[in-house]
Image: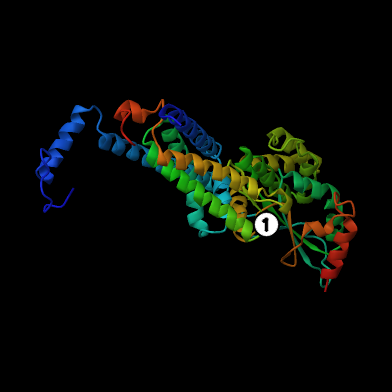
Amino acid sequence: MGKSSRPARKQGPVNDRQAKIQAAAASTSKGPNKIVIGTVVAVLAVIAIVVGAIWQQNSKTDSITDGGKAVPAGTSMGAGFTAYADATLKAGAPTLDVFEDFQCPACKLFEDQMGPTVASLAREGKIKAVYHIKTFLDDNLGNDSSMRAGIGALCAADAGKFEAFHDATYAGQPAKEGEGWTDAQLHAFAQGAGITGTALTTWDECTKAKKYQNYLSDLEEVTFKAGVKSTPTLKLNGTVLDLNTLVDSTGKAYDPAKFTAAITAATK
Amino acid sequence: MNARVKDVLGLLARLILGGVLIYAGAVKVGKPLTSQRAVQAYDVLPYDLAGWVGLILPFAEIVLGLLLVLGLFTRLAAAISALLMTIFIVGIAQAWARGLTIDCGCFGGGGQVTAGETAYPQEIARDLGLVLCGAWLWWRPTSIASLDRVLFGASKEN
């Protein structure tokens, strides 16, 4: 239909206008109109999708802008936190960037087996250890424990106990990924890290105010954009250090000697 | 195959494709960051656009799934779903071909995994099966227990 030059069929619609009238009459006589229902369904579908996407975006934005906007001492927005900062760096010591999420089981494995080596190298000034605390697992696991532990670590840093809190939290990682920690557990990690008295009260206030939430949310985004898409990730002088090259002959455990060798090789 | 059997097959195709879509969408709701990063991990779209796709996709999947399960505008919903699955297959295949090591993020999760954890052949095979369900319904959208039939009559091709 649609060509006015077309000859009229016998007993059929004589022209377009008539055809439309007939079609309209037919549709009203046969119950629901498909075009009306189709329009309603399409509108509802678009509304559902748009409202849903915006709601998701807002819930994400809230988690970023909600809470404190402080930046930890000694670092800046988008940059990691340098641990063992009181150690005197030896000449030519490489920078080791560590990207970890407190809830990540593979990070715990790394910390359990390699943490002491990293710590001693850093204390001796043989590496500059920079920790980039990631929090992406919160979204995936449906809790906020990575963020709360991360804020706890930076609040501990205010008391000079970042490293001890960091180690205590990995030691206390729940066996089942996703269980997270209660506030009381994190408080116990702070105590275990040697934060006491008024410093502990300050730590409690710091975590309650979520003092470093904005810094951590921003850091998560910045590191992902920079290509850190899984944890743990290590970078030695800015180059990704393939963790598969650090395992022992069984292939199941890290070999601290290989790590030390990699550090030595990177020392100028 | 008589019409009755084909109608029942149509119902099965609707429930399988629609059910999978609803499930796939529902598990992503409430996990916006994970969903965005799953899309960004394919490394095809610009970062921000991929982020929006990640936010929209769960709800689009749920809407399409609901239409299929209800049997409303089956042909259109099936055609869009089959197209969507085809896009997913292309996305997975390009990731595989480029040597990326990602989880498809089809049912939540997603993002980078270790080389031994990829499951590209299985993911593509599953999506191919779903494309077939969509193709069947596009070719023959009529089925039993559908709103199309209730609202628009049995004889009409929807």
In terms of depth relative to the viewer, which is nearer, A6 or A229? A6
Check the picture and name the quadrant holding the C terminus of chain B.
Answer: top left
Confirm whether residue B54 shows in the render.
Answer: no
Q: Coloring scheme of the render?
A: rainbow
Q: Residue furthest bottom?
A: A268
**Which residue is label 1 attached to?**
A73
- Residue A82 point in image, percent of width and height: 73, 59
In-image side of A9 versus A34 (left or right): left
In terms of depth relative to the viewer, which is nearer, A125 or A145? A145
Q: How many marks?
A: 1
Confirm whether residue A21 shows in the render.
Answer: yes
Q: Quadrant of residue B23?
A: top right
Q: Chain of mark 1?
A: A
In terms of depth relative to the viewer, which is nearer, B102 or A188? B102
Q: Secondary structure at mark 1?
A: loop
Q: Quadrant of residue B2?
A: top left
Q: Amino acid at mark 1?
A: Ala
- Residue B71 point in image, percent of width and height: 40, 31
**Callout 1: 10 Å neighbours few (<14), some, many (20+)?**
few
In-image side of A159 versus A66 (left or right): right
- Residue B149 point in image, percent of width and height: 34, 28
Q: Residue furthest front?
A: B1
In terms of depth relative to the viewer, which is nearer, B63 or A62? B63
| Residue drawn at x 50%, y 35% as measured from the top left | B22
